[in-house]
């Protein structure tokens, strides 16, 4: 069973609004909260992110197993590693990630305009440099389940449970 385009768009809007609501409730739209997380002074966002990753992993792979959606996970390549490093540096410098930056803009935090402008510039630079970047994307095209020789749903479920367990453990040990 495939979702119609309108259903797909509507589900994206609902999930996006819910995600923005929880970003706001966990104070993830405040730059100092993200900086404190990166400096390991506040673990609230780690708990939120670990729970979101765990639930999402299980949910997306379950939906894929039921034929509701087709997943195309990115293989681990040099391009993914470089992109992750750039993402992390940008997050540390800006004090926001793309989701929290746009949510902060929605809260009328005007400094977020600079962050959103950076997102747009970064997207434009990526689009223009894609022929070069595509070369970095070559290499190992295996996903984690392929490397482990396991069922993707089983791998995602185990990983999801581990992330949720990490969030619970952090919650018990660190307020």
Image (cartoon, grey):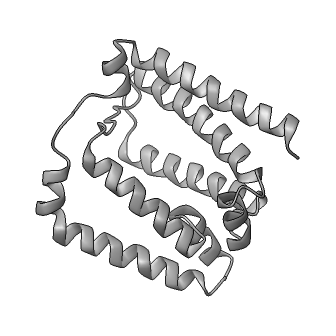
Side of 58 relative to 34 (left or right): left
Residue at figure coordinates x 63%, y 23% from the top left: 161
Q: Position of residue 14 (x, y in %)?
A: 58, 51
Using the rendered view, name the quadrant where residue 2 is placed: top left
Nearest the viewer among 22 and 125 is 125
Classify the position of the N terminus by image quarter: top left
Q: Position of residue 107 (x, y in %)?
A: 68, 76
In the rendered image of this protein, does residue 124 appear above or below residue 133?
A: below
Residue at figure coordinates x 42%, y 73% from the top left: 119
Nearest the viewer among 41 and 45 is 41
In the rendered image of this protein, does residue 54 appear above or below residue 10?
A: above
Side of 150 relative to 78 (left or right): right
Q: Position of residue 73 (x, y in %)?
A: 34, 36
Residue 66 seen in the current view: no
Residue at figure coordinates x 53%, y 66% from the top left: 91
In the rendered image of this protein, does residue 67 appear above or below residue 130?
A: above
Q: How many circles with numbers are drawn on the protein? A: 0
Residue at figure coordinates x 34%, y 49% from the top left: 81
Q: Position of residue 167 (x, y in %)?
A: 73, 36
Residue 144 seen in the current view: yes
């Amino acid at each position: 069973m495939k979702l119609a385009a309108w259903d797909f768009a509507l589900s994206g809007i609902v999930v996006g609004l819910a995600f923005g609501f929880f970003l706001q409730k966990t104070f993830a739209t405040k730059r100092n909260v993200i900086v404190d997380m990166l400096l390991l002074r506040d673990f609230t966002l780690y708990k939120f992110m670990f729970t979101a990753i765990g639930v999402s992993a299980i949910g997306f792979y379950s939906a894929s197993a039921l034929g509701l959606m087709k997943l195309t996970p990115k293989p681990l390549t040099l391009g993914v590693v470089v992109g992750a490093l750039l993402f992390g540096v940008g997050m540390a410098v800006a004090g926001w990630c793309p989701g929290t930056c746009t949510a902060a803009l929605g809260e009328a935090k005007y400094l977020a305009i600079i962050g959103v402008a950076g997102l747009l510039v970064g997207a434009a630079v990526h689009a223009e440099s894609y022929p070069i970047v595509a070369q970095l994307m070559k290499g190992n095209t295996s996903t984690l389940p392929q490397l482990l020789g396991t069922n993707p749903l089983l791998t995602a479920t185990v990983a999801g449970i581990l992330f949720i367990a990490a969030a619970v453990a952090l919650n018990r040990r660190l307020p």
